[in-house]
Image (tube, rainbow, N blue to C red):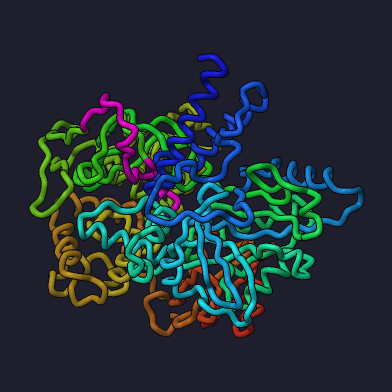
Amino acid sequence: MDIKDKIIKLRKDIKMYSDYYYSNDSSLISDIEFDKLMKQLKELEDEYPEYKDSSSPTEKVGATDMKSTKFQKVTHKRPMLSLSNTYNESEIKDFTDRVKKLLPDNTDVNYALELKLDGLSISVTYEKGKLVKAVTRGDGQIGEDVTENIIEIESLPKILKEPVDIEIRGEVVLPLSKFEKLNKKRLEMGEDVFANPRNAASGTLRQLDSSIIKERGLDAYFYFLIGAENMGFKSHSESLNYIKNLGIKTTGICEICKSANELMKRIDYWGEKREELDYETDGMVIKVNNLNLWDILGATTKSPRWAIAFKFPAKQVTTKIDGVTWQVGRTGKITPVAELKEVELSGSKVKRASLHNFQEIKRKDIKIGDTVFIEKAAEIIPQVIKSVKELRTGKETDIIEPTNCPICNTKVVREEGQVDIKCPNTVCPGKIEGELIYFVSRDAMNIAGFGSKIVENMLRLGFVKNIVDIYDLKRYREQLQNLDKMGEKSVDKLLASIEASKKRDYSKVLCALGIPFVGKTSAKLLAKASGNIDTLINMSVEELMQIEGIGDKMAQAIYDFFRDEDKLKLVIGLKEHGLQFSQDKETKADGDNILAGKTFLFTGTLKNFKREEIKEQIEKLGGKNLSAVSKNLDYLIVGEKAGSKLKKAQDIGTIKIITEDEFIDMCNKK
């Protein structure tokens, strides 16, 4: 394909993706893939200016197809430009360097840093303090009049605190809490779920029935006052305070920075902090704060030169399914895993993603060869969200549910009322591998250095056949040292970690056994109630159900687990190797629950504890760990290089701020 044809194809594809999104409130590809195509097109047009065209998507903003008759079209008094996107620190430095280059020497420049909300852009006009018009971005020049719908957003004032004439711009969003409820409801009604809150917000605002807006709970935040420089304001941050005082909602986040380095530090901070927010943010917006410099810097046909958007690593991306692998877990559950064309997601390379179960595959209508959206569940496990049926070519093939275990070939079973299929073979190698991986994991015995690859190698070489064999691995010290990528130091660390795991609490061992439905929390309840494994083994279903937090299903599973001869042999074997099968007296005694009723949080680098260790210590002594600073927090433990949690705790004033040594002293008091 020659350069001209490549440019024509890119323009055609970008227009198709853009038109589809603005017409259907849904995406055919992820934002990052769209941005890559746009960047590729711009680079080609810059390199080959003879093929430039004023109708190219690189010269347009937003929608290119405005044929929809849902809403009346309105021309913006001032174009709603989009922002250029950047994805790394060096590009932020390029932006600040460009700004300085365009300005007279020694010009003092400040930058305003704001959250970039992932919703639907909106422009709202007030006359004499009364809301009179609301228009979507559209193509940047012409948008859609959605006034009747926007007034249904409860947080948006219909009358301002002052009778002023202003136009403000912002973002309509669907809070994450509302988004989850909406998708749950749609799922129950058999409707397609929204891929993300942005699509949900866009689809909701453009409903013909305006009552749906209030029902779903849309919200709106504003970040721009049109003509602020003509109203006497000298900075963008001042103008935001002004609209906030009028009763208009802003995020409240507008930090002033002096340099690219300072900007990047705060971007890193908000990259983590954003997970605590109730709305989606896909990046940060950097604006020159000095309003008098905006005219000097100017704008391109598409974006201003005084602002840029930094995009966080994508939470959702699109890729293709090349095949499906069926995995066997520790309980025998057989789950489908999508084998993907490699793609970057949230800063890491992804080749595989969960498909959950066959019922989900059917519900989502996913085929091999499909283009699919994937995201990381809880920022950890990649999962397939939906297929893009509009991009099918006809060559896609159905995914077939297996009738036999993919590991041992035993005929699979499906329990009544369950969606999952299982391998019933108790000695299935797939189940054994799953049991071992779970046993050594962080939430269980937390044996450092014993990852899934090591488990796989130990099974393949025959050094380990079951969980008990882990504690006999020291017999193979020499053979282990000769393995690829192991070596003497690695082996010594692994064996030392195995030995150290023998001191893990009784509750940890209970969790590691892999009793169905028993996780970290329920294992602690069982350990506290039983005191030791022998008492637990001899408890009846009724006695187990009397333990607070243990339901009938879990009680039956625990009872059945300890009636299995192989599981009892496992317990005996682990006992013989010295693992803890009784509650620590200090933990069990009520008089020694010295942190009972107290809440804790730590910040900074600790010298005596790892993150999980200090949490365990707090819980062991009856305390509770919190995830964020709030008025409910009693103690903030401060380590080296303490972060923003310290300042927030100081601002609240009622939280006791203690050092790590002071915490240790608290724990040692009797």
State the residue lying farthest toward the right. Answer: 105
- Examine the rendering and report whether any part of residue 433 can be seen: yes
Nearest the eye: 63 or 495: 63
Q: Position of residue 97 (x, y in %)?
A: 79, 44
Q: Which residues are magenta?
A: 373-398
Looking at the image, is 412 positioned above or below residue 665?
Answer: above
Image side of residue 505 versus residue 433, left or right: right
Q: Position of residue 331 (x, y in %)?
A: 22, 48
Does residue 261 belong to the magenta stretch? no
Q: Which residue is depicted at the point 57% across and 49% down?
A: 141
Nearest the eye: 471 or 232: 232
Image side of residue 376 versus residue 331, left or right: right
State the residue lying farthest toward the left. Answer: 416
- Examine the rendering and report whether any part of residue 443 can be seen: no
Q: Quadrant of residue 235?
A: bottom right
Q: Which residue is depicted at the point 58% across and 65% down?
A: 222
Q: Position of residue 518 (x, y in %)?
A: 27, 61
Image side of residue 641 versus residue 250, left or right: right
Looking at the image, is 295 positioned above or below residue 348?
Answer: below
Q: Which residue is depicted at the point 49% across and 56% down?
A: 120
Looking at the image, is 338 positioned above or below residue 534?
Answer: above
Q: Position of residue 19 (x, y in %)?
A: 43, 41
Does residue 389 belong to the magenta stretch? yes
Nearest the eye: 657 or 372: 372
